[in-house]
Image: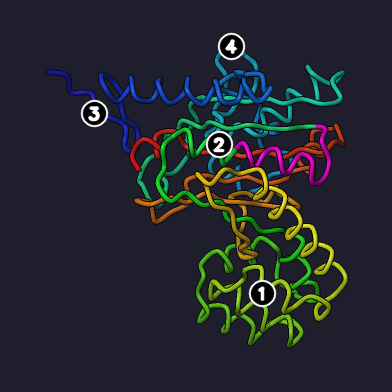
Amino acid sequence: MSTIKPILGLDDAFGDRAKSLRTLQFKLGKVYEDAGFSEVIPPLVERPEALNSGAGSFLSDQTIVFSDPANAGILAIRPDMTPQIARIVATRLHQENQLKLYYSGQVMLARPDVRTGSRQQWQTGVECLGLAGMEGDVEVIHLAALSMAAAGFKDAVLQVGHMGIINALIDSSTTSLEDWVALIARYSPEDLRAHLAKDHVSGIAQDALMSLASGQADGGWLQAYRGKINKKFDKAADELASLVSTVQSKLSGEVAIEIDAAVTPRFLYHNGMVFTGFASGSAHALLHGGRYDKMMAAHGRDMPAVGFSFDLWAWLDT
């Protein structure tokens, strides 16, 4: 009998489980191909700076680095594939003005996920590059809805927010955006109230932030605070309301879409609109997406970019 111990947080897939993953992977690939997206297959390893550009510590803390025995220097195992897409578009595909890409492959985390205990994910997603503003946002959110419908989720819903709203509310704050995102993501009014007691945020913005933490930041919330915060808030609120209305007109009912200004991104390379996907049987988000123009600029090519991704293993286990 082998004495080799399995690696904590990593697992093997075989038999029906492996077949189920491939079946869903190919089914989703057809959805993306039919929508005009082309597949890209990045390598498992990258240079650390390519993975961390535009993403900061959100990715570097989950990146495994090692010294390459073939003398390529310090390399890293990808914990997320979106930075790889940005690197490919900024280099090998630099001559293309618009790109619609999808991918599906393994990523590995340096530390186990706090919810699942796993260090491996089968990340699948799409990236739409070169389409600015609502045109690209609508196409990607619609494709996310089609993905959840194709996977057969029950009571699926996409919740859409906007980083411009959060930035407008904390405009006078001395706390970093990273800390604010972590705080809002807890949905804890008690924690937020304690923080506001020692931060420099205007009274009306404090009220709005408390509503965010209480899960009350829907379309009615947007209207209630419109004209009361600042111009940045109104601009982001108008963009969000128009975006959700447009996507709703494209859906056929399999997936619901709603405004939730408290939606925060998984990684802080997102700017503009952000969204998450939920369904019956899961207490946690099954899908994350949004606009990430800043990452492209960090890779040396300033162009609009928007996309979403999810863990195919988590979809199979829901």
Up-down: is 278 above or below 107? below
Which labelled disc corresponds to residue 221? 1
- Distance between mark 2 and mark 3 Cα atoms: 41 Å
- Which residues are the magenta region? 130-143
Crowdedness of circle 4 by 10 Å Cα count: few (<14), some, many (20+)?
few
Q: Check disc 1: other Cα within 10 Å, few if <14, some if 14-19, many if 20+.
A: some
- Residue at image position (48%, 38%) is 149
Q: CA distance from mark 3 to mark 1?
A: 53 Å
Mark 3 residue type:
Lys
Q: Which residue is mark 4?
A: 70
**Dot 3 crowding, Cα within 10 Å, few <14, some 14–19, many 20+:** few
Magenta highlight: main SS: helix
Q: Amino acid at mark 1?
A: Trp
Under mark 4, the amino acid is Ala
Q: Are marks 2 and 3 in contact (CB under 8 Å)?
A: no
Which of the numbered marks, if any, corresponds to residue 146?
A: 2
Q: Earlier in the sequence, mark 2 or mark 3?
A: 3
Q: Which residue is mark 3?
A: 5
Q: Distance between the Cα atoms at labels 2 and 4?
A: 43 Å
Badge count: 4
Q: Position of residue 155 (x, y in %)?
A: 43, 51
User: If you read the primary sequence from the N terminus, does the residue marked by circle 2 or circle 1 appear first?
Assistant: 2
The one nearer the camera, 107 or 49, is: 107
> Which one is in front in this view, the residue at disc 3 or the one at disc 4?
3
- Image vertical order of residue 170 relative to residue 296, above or below: below
